[in-house]
């Protein structure tokens, strides 16, 4: 039974709520709790775009004709056979409003790229031109979707950088450490990146106004308090260009304070733009590639973010959820997962198309079951998203991202596991069934 006091969202649309046992669920518009099981990248434009799914569409139409409705029904049937019940991100609109939940990404860095701050690969939320562009994009996208019952809600970015002193990666394995490491002083952090922007950038002014207010409106005092050697914003920019990475305790205090301010403004502005045109659907936040750092997570304002979203390709799926949850205890949606990447297998063998040994397949199979079933013992997880629908890897016997290849051939390795795991997840989530710890 869902505790009415826990409900988040608009009645009659998708909501989230916590059961009396303390578990979060995604609630359909009729109030029925479900676990979201989506698939990414059903991206099938008819303009010849180069995605694998577009190639699949082209090949399918050669054999079956150009009826887009039949194609969509065919794809939905495949997903249903595998136990999926939702369309993940990057599904073209012909997949929307077909009785399955779906989500929409209104990407902050794509509406006005000139406002991007790179590094750390984020948007200058203080830029009025970006704010106007984002509002206009939200108007165009959200207005016709405001009353759609199958829409869960909106993401506002994908794997953006947050410029924090904790570096992590969505992949793990050879792409980064399994445990966050402190990189303070190894690369410029968020505040420094904004301070070092060109003088005419709004983020430059916002960051300097923020810092000067905290240090007696004196650049010299800022430098002294940070133990740094610069006499003007221009000189700091020069040092930044030469590789400076501020790392003193004094700078760290201001970095944390600015991060909090930036995070709160980011989610406030994006949510206000979306809700101006659609007050009915959930705010799903930024699809984190890895934990953005405790300061960012602590700055989450529940008025502007309803669900914490994150990608993950690691076997320690449950532990990854807990990394977020211990700082931001809120409902969570995994927005990308597969057992291809991270520590599941030898990534290079997949890239070059080399087949895996029976022993390697068995290892991945064991890790896959333990990871996915174990993840749903965490009370915060309301669903996960498989990445992705179609990929180029041809071997049906080996692990791969895709459920099929552009020729429409199914990946038997993935199908076997998904058909085994999916029917068990609800019972695992309710504590009625233990996850398979042996694989």
Image: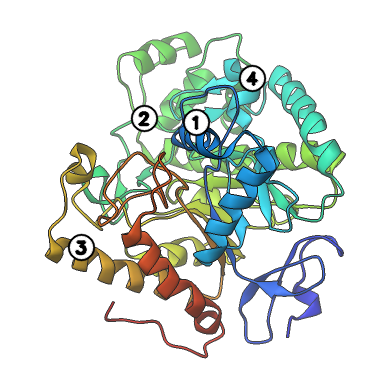
Label whose residue precedes the other's in the sequence (2 or 1): 1
Residue 229, how many percent across, how many down?
35, 19
Q: Indicate the secondary structure of the residue bearing disc 1.
A: helix
**Residue furthest toward the bottom?**
432
Residue under circle 4?
112
- Which of labels 4 and 2 is toward the front? 4
Sequence-first tag of 2 and 3: 2
C-beta proximity under 8 Å, tags 4 and 2:
no
- The structure residue drawn at horizontal position 60% and vertical position 69%, both measured from the top left corner, is 35
**Secondary structure under the numbered disc 2 in the rendered image:** loop
The residue depicted at 26 percent of the width and 43 percent of the height is: 175
For label 3, the crowd category at 10 Å Cα-Cα, with few meaning under 14, some 14 to 19 and many 20 or more, is some
In this orientation, which residue lies closer to the viewer: 296 or 236?
296
Between circles 1 and 3, the one closer to the viewer is 3
Judging by the rendered image, the residue that carries numbered circle 1 is 191
Asked whether residue 333 appears in the rendered view, the answer is no
How far is disc 4 from disc 2 in space, using C-alphas? 29 Å
Circle 3 SS class: helix
Question: How far across and how far down the image is residue 303, in percent?
Answer: 75, 54
Q: Is residue 14 left or right of residue 335?
A: right
Q: Is 325 placed left or right of 178 in the picture?
A: right
């Amino acid at each position: 039974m869902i505790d009415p006091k826990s409900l988040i969202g608009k009645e009659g649309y998708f909501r989230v709520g916590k059961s009396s046992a303390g578990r979060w669920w995604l609630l359909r518009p009729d109030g029925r709790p479900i676990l979201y099981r989506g698939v990414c990248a059903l991206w099938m434009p008819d303009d010849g775009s180069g995605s694998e799914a577009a190639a699949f569409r082209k090949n399918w139409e050669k054999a079956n004709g150009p009826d887009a409705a039949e194609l969509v029904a065919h794809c939905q049937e495949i997903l249903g056979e595998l136990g999926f019940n939702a369309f993940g991100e990057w599904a073209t609109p012909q997949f929307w409003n077909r009785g399955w939940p779906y989500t929409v990404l209104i990407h902050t860095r794509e509406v006005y790229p000139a406002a991007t701050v790179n590094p750390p690969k984020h948007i200058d939320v203080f830029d009025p031109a970006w704010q106007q562009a984002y509002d206009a994009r939200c108007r165009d996208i959200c207005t016709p979707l405001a009353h759609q019952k199958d829409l869960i809600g909106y993401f506002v970015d994908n794997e953006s950088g947050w410029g924090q002193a904790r570096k992590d990666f969505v992949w793990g394995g050879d792409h980064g450490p399994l445990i966050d490491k402190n990189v303070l002083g190894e690369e410029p952090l968020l505040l420094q990146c904004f301070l070092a922007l060109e003088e005419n950038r709004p983020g430059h002014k916002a960051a300097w106004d923020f810092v000067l207010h905290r240090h007696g409106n004196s650049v010299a005092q800022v430098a002294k308090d940070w133990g740094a050697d610069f006499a003007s914003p221009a000189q700091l920019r020069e040092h930044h260009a030469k590789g400076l990475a501020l790392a003193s305790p004094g700078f760290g205090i201001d970095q944390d304070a600015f991060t909090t301010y930036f995070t709160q403004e980011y989610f406030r502005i994006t949510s206000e733009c979306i809700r101006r045109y659609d007050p009915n659907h959930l705010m799903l936040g930024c699809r984190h590639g890895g934990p953005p750092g405790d300061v960012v997570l602590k700055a989450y304002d529940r008025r502007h973010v309803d669900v914490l979203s994150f990608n993950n390709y690691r076997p320690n799926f449950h532990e990854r959820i807990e990394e977020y949850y211990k700082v931001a205890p809120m409902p969570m949606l995994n927005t990308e997962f597969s057992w291809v990447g991270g520590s599941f297998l030898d990534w290079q063998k997949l890239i070059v198309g080399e087949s895996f040994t029976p022993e390697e397949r068995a290892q991945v199979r064991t890790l896959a079951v333990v990871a996915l079933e174990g993840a749903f013992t965490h009370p915060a997880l309301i669903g996960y998203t498989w990445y992705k629908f179609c990929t180029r890897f041809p071997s049906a016997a080996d692990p791969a991202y895709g459920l099929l290849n552009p020729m429409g051939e199914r990946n038997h390795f993935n199908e076997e596991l998904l058909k085994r795991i999916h029917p068990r997840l609800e019972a695992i989530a309710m504590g009625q069934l233990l996850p398979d710890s042996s694989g």
